[in-house]
Image (cartoon, rainbow, N blue to C red):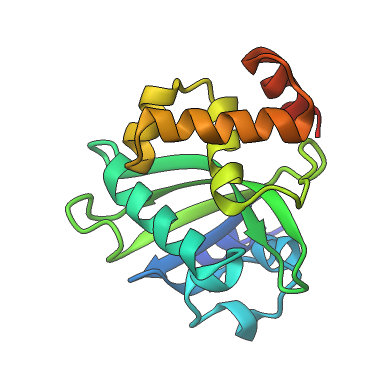
Amino acid sequence: MAEPTIDYRTAFEQAPIGLALSRQRLIVDCNRHVLAMFRAQQDQLVGQSFAVMYPSVDEFERTGERIVAQLDQDGRYADDRVMKRMDGELFWCHVSGRAIDPKNPHAAGIWAFEDLSSRRVLKLEFTPREREIAALLIEGLTSKLIGKRLAISPRTVDVYRARLMRKTGAATTPELINKLLSR
């Protein structure tokens, strides 16, 4: 019996996670898991800006700035963020990846996507900034660290935290985080 041929293309397509290759924030290629996750046809993603996968152009731009600011020395980055399927549904997604050249982060990269919607249900009443701050609170960051990461003041973070607490009915930050995780 002949051994099956395994090449890079087969490995890319058969990977157990969604994978996408990028150049200048354009999708150069993606595997079938990304297409299924985003409910897309190949021509809806390949050759397009990653912006088509975001709830708004503003969130796409802010995330791009955050990636540049947060890359580690090897060019790696990861976060949980709200993304948009081609049918318009918003969902939580874990995105991790690596810039091929950390000195030019958007020149080329490889990105992995994991759909978190079975574990984290998105409530649409949150604004894009509230979703961003909620994700960072869940990661355990303080107002000061969130402020640094988002280039806003810690006081502004506290204002958003108070809004999130009102919207969720949480009395304390730990209760807020618990409610956010259970949504």
For the C terminus, the image quarter is top right
Q: Position of residue 140 (x, y in %)?
A: 52, 20
Which residue occupies the foreground of this view, 75 or 171?
Answer: 171
Q: Which residue is drawn at 77% across and 25% down?
A: 179
Which residue occupies the foreground of this view, 106 or 181?
Answer: 181
- Measured along the vertical axis of the image, is residue 10 above or below residue 45? above
Choose top left, top right, bottom left or bottom right for residue 156.
top left
Q: Where is residue 65 in the image (x, y as percent from the top left)?
A: 33, 54
For the N terminus, the image quarter is bottom right
Judged from this view, the residue extending furthest toward the bottom is: 43
Along the horizontal axis of the image, is 48 left or right of 67? right
Choose top left, top right, bottom left or bottom right for residue 94.
top right
Along the horizontal axis of the image, is 98 left or right of 107? right
Q: Which residue is drawn at 20% across and 59% down?
A: 104
Q: Where is residue 53 in the image (x, y as percent from the top left)?
A: 59, 67
- Measured along the vertical axis of the image, is residue 67 above or below residue 51? above
